[in-house]
Image: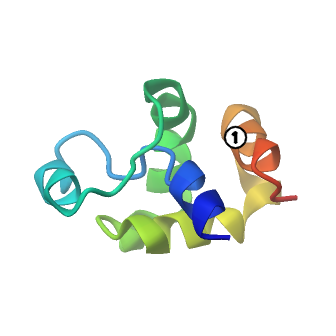
């Protein structure tokens, strides 16, 4: 499960929003492609969780059916349905 959470952080600290903090804490933010895929969904569905990576990941995972196709693919590839 911890590995899934690392994989699924999917760049959920966006742009300059907490990026320095995330890097200082060593949190994995996903690949650039994962970040691009999920950035709009973070703002649309989970903006209140920014900059907490774990909370953003949990928020998106709880809403897989409402994610954009590209972001949903990221989560489904990691086993979330």
Q: Residue furthest right?
A: 81
Residue 79 versus residue 46 in the image, above or below: above
Q: Say which residue appears at 44% left-offset and 53% top-offset.
A: 43
Coordinates of residue 65 in the picture (x, y in percent): 83, 57
Coordinates of residue 64 in the picture (x, y in percent): 76, 58
Q: How many marks?
A: 1
Coordinates of residue 23 in the picture (x, y in percent): 19, 51
Coordinates of residue 49 in the picture (x, y in percent): 39, 72
Residue placed most toward the observer, 78 or 44: 78
Q: Is residue 36 left or right of residue 60?
A: left
Instruction: Say which quadrant the C terminus sits in.
Output: bottom right
Q: Is residue 76 left or right of residue 49?
A: right
Q: Say which residue appears at 57% left-offset and 32% top-offset.
A: 37
Q: Residue furthest top?
A: 33
Q: Say which residue appears at 76% left-offset and 35% top-offset.
A: 69
Q: How is the image coloured?
A: rainbow
The quadrant where residue 50 appears? bottom left
Q: Say which residue appears at 18% left-offset and 56% top-offset.
A: 18
Q: Is residue 56 left or right of residue 15?
A: right
Residue placed most toward the observer, 23 or 76: 23
Q: Secondary structure at mark 1?
A: helix
Instruction: Say which quadrant the N terminus sits in.
Output: bottom right
Callout 1 crowding tier (Cα within 10 Å): few <14, some 14–19, many ≥20: many
Q: In this figure, which residue is indicated by the disc labeled 1?
A: 74
């Amino acid at each position: 499960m911890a590995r899934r959470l690392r994989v699924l952080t999917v760049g959920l600290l966006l742009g300059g929003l907490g990026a320095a903090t995330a890097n200082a804490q060593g949190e994995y933010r996903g690949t650039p492609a994962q970040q691009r895929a999920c950035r709009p969904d973070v703002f649309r569905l989970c903006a209140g969780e920014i900059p907490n990576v774990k909370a953003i990941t949990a928020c998106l995972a709880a809403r897989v059916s409402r994610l954009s196709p590209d972001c949903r693919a990221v989560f489904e590839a990691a086993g979330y349905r």
